[in-house]
Amino acid sequence: MTLSLDEARSTLQRTFGFAEFRAGQAEVIKVVLGGGDVLAVMPTGSGKSLCFQLPALLRPGLTVVVSPLIALMRDQVGQLRSYGIAAASLNSANEPGEARAAHDALRDGSLRLLYVAPERIAREDTIELLCSAGTSLLAIDEAHCVSQWGHDFRPEYLALGAVRERLGGVQTIALTATADPATRADIVQRLFTAPPRVFVSSFDRPNIRLAMQPKAGARRQLGEFLGRHRGSSGIVYCASRKRTEELATSFVDGGYRALPYHAGMETAQRNRHQDRFLEEDGVVMVATVAFGMGIDKPDVRFVCHADMPQNVEAYYQEIGRAGRDGLPAETLTLYGLDDMKLRRLQIEEGAASSERQRIERQKLNALIALCEAPRCRRQTLLAYFGESALPCGNCDLCSGGVELFDGTVEAQKAMSAILRTGERFGTEHLVQILTGGTSDAIRRYRHDTLPTFGVGKDRSANEWRSLFRQLYAAGLLHLDIAEHGRWVVTERGRQVLRGAERIELRKDSLPTAGRGRKAKAAPAAAAAGSPEDQVLFGALKELRREIAGRLRQPTYVVFPDRTLLEMVAHRPQSLDAMAGLYGIGQTKLAKYGPAFLALLRRHSEDDAAGRAATPSRK
């Protein structure tokens, strides 16, 4: 049976309420409908799930989805059922009644999609069940987990290639948001017996604003950032469990609905916090990287890194949890030399092979270069994934601008201080030498007698710290973690020291108290327009919250913010008019449309009454 994209587009509108495919979806869906195997690398928020969900409705047989997280399974099953699609999951958290209902639906052939954990699908009884149920498509979500080169390797994914063969070499689509060429090759080798069609979409997420700042009072910087997003949902990532607890307490004291999340918490408490984040508006999750994979909440308005991420892939994956609805979202990453030391130490002390450590060092260097980038951050980020782009206009470097200068002399001063002290000292001691500071160590080693002592008095200690980071990012210096963070001059650095090469650096304006962008409304509320529009938007959100509470579902399963904003913009006064709005398919229109339509009509009547009661001015 050959199915056309026109048929798929009709189902897309009728069931999901979307008028058109997003970029990259149509090409993948066409191959899946034609029976081909696929590896799809598509950015978070681009609609990867639709690439197997839509074909599951158009073709006979069962679609089995391998998903790494119970919360994600529960979320996606809830969303599919809200569209009127027969979906279920098999996992350890199922109530006995849920498991029986799923088995019954498998036996009678009524189920369209079944979500299964990777360890569950490898069981003999599960494989027999799926074979008898007529599995026709295997979808492997978060497919980078199968690769040891990926940033989130999971050993249980290694069995999926064998599972695929046990299911009769069933047609397979593997999906991920981040996979460099080495990871993609590993996925293909481990999951497929013949080369699949590989689709790599643009990694650009233009609705997300990128920003990075050197740490200069991190708690204050975080407070200023969160102050622009009161009432919005967001994530703050931290490098340690202790820091998540401390920052969550600090944010609560500041009036935010903040919750900690890390692997050291009791499972029940961790699940409660995750459920609150998913189901409620305006919750700030303060978390380690244990939180986030598979989080499908579309209205996350910001992601902040209180500490520098592990590498570029982790950074991209984590910020990608913001703005999945396509509305404006904002990010901020704080970084410092202590972060760089920690990440380097984690690599050096890890159990990975020397080759793996070499690759991880390169990835960390690429992240440091992104932090210290002199020009458009999006250009630097996309270049890492092999894409070229024009300046984006939606990052801190494009909007605020960075002034560059010939930093050759400053670099020579810093490297001279390093070499004259025997390449034995770290940043703070060298900054003391350059700025002419005094300390017991300076006097003990008689470094106040060096020719370089005080040659950098024209710059502050913070400026010199920034310059050391930039010289590191540019490859002029090497940070020796094994020797307590001492700086070593590289061969390229010696070229600059000799005057054979010049180096351009950025004037790093560190944020100070009271500075920064003017506080503004959260992006979703701002998009609602006038004060009257925002009142209506708030009323629609409250109605959505009440309905979701009755259903015990996240609010966005009813309607995402984008749908409510279209209601505000278009003010539909009939179900037919409402049917044309984003995300309102037939089932949702029948289930939720009358309640929202009644609210919109009341609002229009109140507006009309208000205008009639207001005397006109001549």
Image (cartoon, rainbow, N blue to C red):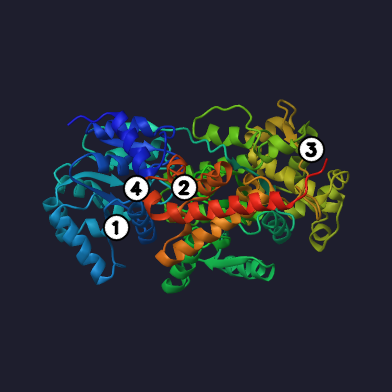
Q: Earlier along the polypeptide chain: callout 4 or callout 1? A: 1
Does residue 235 appear in the picture of this structure? no
**Mark 4 crowdedness (10 Å alpha carbons): few <14, some 14-19, many ≥20:** many
Mark 3–mark 1 contact, CB under 8 Å?
A: no
- Cα separation, mark 4 vs mark 3, equals 49 Å
Q: Residues within 10 Å of mark 1 (few under 14, many from 20)?
A: many
What residue do we see at 69% from left, 37% from top?
Answer: 397
* Label 4 with label 1: CB-CB less than 8 Å: no
Instruction: Report the mark closest to the observer, 4 or 3.
Output: 4
Give the image quarter of residue 375.
top right
Query: Could you tell me if residue 599 is visible in this image?
Result: yes
The x, y position of residue 42, in whole percent, is: 42, 38
Q: Secondary structure at mark 4?
A: loop
Label at residue 117: 1
Q: Which residue is mark 4?
A: 141
Mark 3 lies on a secondary structure that is: helix
Q: Which residue is mark 3?
A: 410
